[in-house]
Amino acid sequence: MLKDKPSKKIDKPSKKIDKFMGFDVQMTRKVDFIEENNESYDYCDPVDVQIGYFREALRNSTHVIIFSKPDAGGMALIQMHDSPKSIYVDLICAKKAGAAIMKFIAKYAKERKYKYIYLYSVIQVINFYRKLGYKHAKDCKTPEPEYITEIANEELDKRYDTQREYLKDWDYLHYLHYLTTEEGLAKDCPKYILEEMKEEEEYEWNEEEEYFENEDYVVGNCMDDGYMMILCLDK
């Protein structure tokens, strides 16, 4: 798991509004955002992002990126690090703006010679990030395991609205299984989960709710906290 050091020399992007892919874009330091918006939560759906998590991500961020246009918009909370030079995307809230925000961050990072961008993806948007070039790897020196690349490509076009729908898909559940048991890819994953691969028989079909469940990892912190994904920029 990457343990980057926060940047001591914080970038100070202009507070002016720029244009990117049809959006008005403003990138500002966290302290300026809090001063002007009083920890605004307007960009996030409270069903998907709890206010407590938003405040924690905002507190830990160094910069806030805001995208807006009449029918779409969103925001990203990011941390810029200088050892090594990287960007951590902690939180994105977006309506028809997610891809534009991520492409803007990649463009910004490349122009300033950042080595990589990384994040922890919840299961609903893993395929979204893969289509933008993100891989499941611990760092840029360690390639994505071939078996994970193979199964990820097989599952790439699947898209469901909720976690529960993903858990109904046996093949996708296996994909999450592999991400969970590959050490370093699951954030804050309980140690006992990594000790052995769980056999298929250990999964139970919940007749009432219609999804597979396994208390060991499917409903644990591994799924809720997300899976490591990285976009390497120095190639």
Image: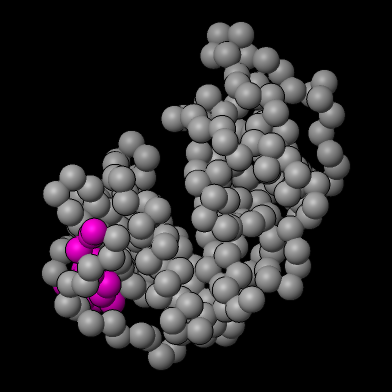
Residue 85 x, y percent position in the rendering? 54, 82
Report if residue 23 lies within the magenta region: yes
Q: Quadrant of the N terminus?
A: bottom right
Instruction: Please indicate, yes or no, whether residue 11 appears anywhere in the rendered image.
Output: yes
Q: Is residue 99 above or below residue 8?
A: above
196 lies left or right of 212: right
Magenta span of residues: 22-35
The picture quadrant where one finds residue 158 is top right
Q: Is residue 135 above or below residue 88?
A: above
Residue 62 x, y percent position in the rendering? 37, 75
Report if residue 34 lies within the magenta region: yes
Which one is in front, 175 or 8? 175
Q: Quadrant of the C terminus?
A: bottom right
Q: Is residue 68 above or below residue 111?
A: above
How many marks can you see?
Answer: 0
Residue name at image x 64 percent, y 36 percent: 155
Which one is in front, 92 or 113? 113
